[in-house]
Image (cartoon, rainbow, N blue to C red):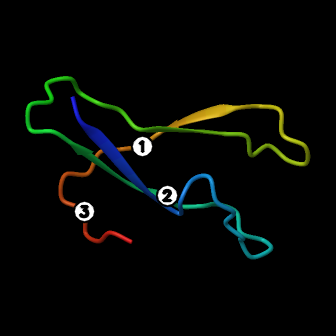
Amino acid sequence: MYAKTICYPPLGELTVLPIGTGWVEFTVVLETGAASEKPLEVALWCDLELPYGGKWTELIFEERTNPTSLV
């Protein structure tokens, strides 16, 4: 099975947000091989609870087969 993900903003790199930004929008492209029979799911685990975190949350991405734009 072949699976490749592309994410924006990139994971594993620092992304600076303006003060007061209440959310971050992620765009993820999941590329799989034509022979892939298993349905795949993309999720982001994050720890955004302020001020010190401590509560990890799983965010499931929604599939869009015809996106209007890609970053």
Q: Which residue is mark 3?
A: 67
Identify the secondary structure beneath mark 2: loop
Task: Return the residue nearer the eye: 39 or 1.
Answer: 1
Residues under numbered marks 1 and 2 in contact, where contact means CB atoms less than 8 Å apart: yes
Identify the secondary structure beneath mark 1: loop
Q: Residue at x 35, y 32 (%)?
A: 41
Quadrant where the C terminus is found in the figure: bottom left
Whichever of labels 3 and 1 marks the residue nearer the N terminus, that label is 1
Task: Return the residue nearer the eye: 53 or 21.
Answer: 53
As drawn, which residue projects farthest toward the left? 35
Q: Residue at x 42, y 43 (%)?
A: 61
Q: Position of residue 43 (x, y in %)?
A: 47, 37
In the picture, measured across the screen, residue 33 lies left or right of residue 13, that is: left
Residues under numbered marks 3 and 1 in contact, where contact means CB atoms less than 8 Å apart: no
Amino acid at the residue labelled 1: Phe
> Mark 2: few, some, or many residues within 10 Å (few <14, many ≥20)?
few
Which disc number belongs to residue 61? 1
Whichever of labels 1 and 2 marks the residue nearer the N terminus, that label is 2
Q: Residue at x 79, y 43 (%)?
A: 49
